[in-house]
Image (cartoon, rainbow, N blue to C red):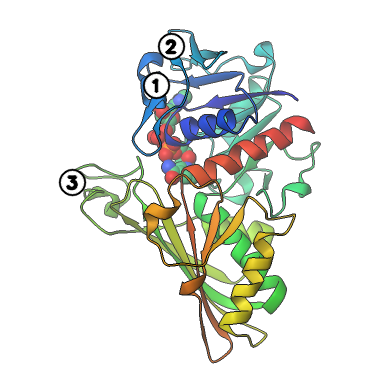
């Protein structure tokens, strides 16, 4: 297995590290950020969304000690780490700065072999592939794919839904809307932001927003005719995407729900897709490692061909778990 580095130790970087360590997947070779290591260690140890890390966490200026693992801390305020000299193979970029090709290429120029971007790239030209666990990870081509985007948390929640409905019933066209927790890209109180709607207080508003999920899905299924948007709402994590599609083949609510039950226990989607039989709210899925959790009681079918399906996802933990699984996969190829 090659060395994996976490670059950007914010919500996704810390949650990915927690998932990698607690699921015994790997110990990151290094963690890098531009902030103080002690502050970052404190945030890792005591997390508002996931509670106290169940182990020992301390920091010095150049390292974290988590459990019995010493993990190098590289402050990259002035320059990116020299990945080649360090022997790092896969950099998971969780800073939002690698969504352009030049931002991601900077890691390759510093000697990394692969960059895994924790977001949708700005355009198809800004990455070599969009690869999602359970969907198309096996399309990874080590000689061609060096900058890999894993899409967004919403992409990963939507993809199993689109895959199953597409394969079993055929999708003519459709819309999705995700009701999404707020994130650090929004404002705590009102202030002008680049995206106008982000200018209003995140914990006090329902904020319509764009979603890059449809664009990322088109990389996987170029013929897919789906588009959608997001509504950012005042929860700290935990989101739900509703997909409304017209299907080719007439179906029933019972048939659709049975399709998802079967898919959730399939080899390809076990651990990625799950189903809820009972009625819950978003608190139910906070901390879940599955990245697409179908709320079966919400499934609706109108006139046989108009279908509505809702999938929950912990936008942090579900996505971060897929991210470390993907990084591990690339590091082993
Ligand atoms: N939060 C979510 O629910 C979520 C889900 C999926 C994907 N994402 C994506 O993941 C990325 C990170 O999101 P986040 O919510 O973790 O953001 P965040 O603001 O919590 O974390 C970003 C981290 O990157 C660090 N950073 C900034 N510039 C840096 C630099 N030049 N070098 C090193 N570190 C730097 C920051 O100090 C911070 O710790 C974004 O692209 C976001 O779209 C977020």
CA neighbours of label 2 inside 10 A, class few (<14), some (14 to 19), many (20+): many
Q: Quadrant of residue 144?
A: top right
- Farthest-out residue, left: 190
Dot 3 corresponds to which residue?
Answer: 190
Rendering coords of residue 119 (x, y %): 53, 44
Rendering coords of residue 11 (x, y %): 42, 35
Q: Inspect this view and state whether residue 74 appears.
A: yes
Q: Residue at x 44, y 60 (%)?
A: 240
Dot 1 corresponds to which residue?
Answer: 40
Q: Inspect this view and state whether residue 119 appears.
A: no
Badge 2 or badge 3: first in the primary sequence: 2
Ligand 1, by image quadrant, is: top left
Dots 2 and 1: beta carbons under 8 Å?
yes
Dots 2 and 3: beta carbons under 8 Å?
no
Q: Quadrant of residue 50?
A: top left
Dot 2 corresponds to which residue?
Answer: 59
Q: Residue at x 26, y 43 (%)?
A: 187
């Amino acid at each position: 297995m090659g060395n994996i580095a976490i670059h950007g130790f914010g919500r996704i970087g810390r949650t990915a590290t927690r998932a990698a360590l607690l699921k015994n997947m790997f110990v990151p070779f290094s963690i890098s950020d531009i902030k103080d290591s002690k502050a970052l260690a404190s945030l890792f140890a005591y997390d508002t969304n996931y509670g106290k890390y169940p182990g020992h966490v301390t920091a010095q200026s150049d390292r974290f000690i988590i459990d019995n693992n010493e993990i190098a801390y590289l402050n990259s305020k002035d320059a990116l780490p020299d990945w080649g000299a360090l022997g790092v193979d896969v950099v998971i970029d969780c800073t939002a700065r690698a969504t352009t090709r030049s931002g991601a290429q900077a890691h390759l120029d510093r000697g990394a072999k692969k960059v895994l971007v924790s977001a949708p790239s700005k355009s198809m030209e800004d990455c070599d592939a969009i690869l999602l666990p359970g969907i198309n990870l096996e399309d990874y081509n080590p000689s061609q794919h060096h900058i890999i985007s894993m899409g967004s948390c919403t992409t990963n929640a939507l993809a199993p839904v689109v895959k199953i409905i597409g394969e079993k019933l055929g999708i003519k066209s459709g819309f999705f809307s995700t009701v999404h927790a707020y994130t650090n890209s929004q404002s705590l109180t009102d202030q002008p932001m680049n995206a106008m709607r982000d200018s209003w207080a995140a914990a006090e508003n329902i904020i319509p927003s764009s979603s890059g999920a449809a664009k990322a899905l088109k990389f996987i299924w170029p013929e897919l005719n789906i588009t959608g948007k997001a509504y950012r709402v005042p929860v700290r994590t935990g989101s739900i995407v509703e997909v409304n599609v017209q299907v080719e083949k007439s179906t029933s609510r019972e048939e659709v729900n049975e399709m998802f039950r079967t898919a959730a226990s399939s080899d390809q989607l076990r651990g990625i897709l799950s189903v809820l039989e009972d009625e819950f709210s978003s608190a139910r899925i906070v901390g879940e490692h599955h990245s697409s959790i179908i709320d079966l009681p919400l499934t609706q079918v109108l006139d046989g061909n108009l279908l509505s399906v809702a999938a929950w996802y912990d936008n942090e933990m579900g996505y971060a778990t897929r991210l470390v699984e993907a990084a591990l996969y690339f590091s082993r190829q």
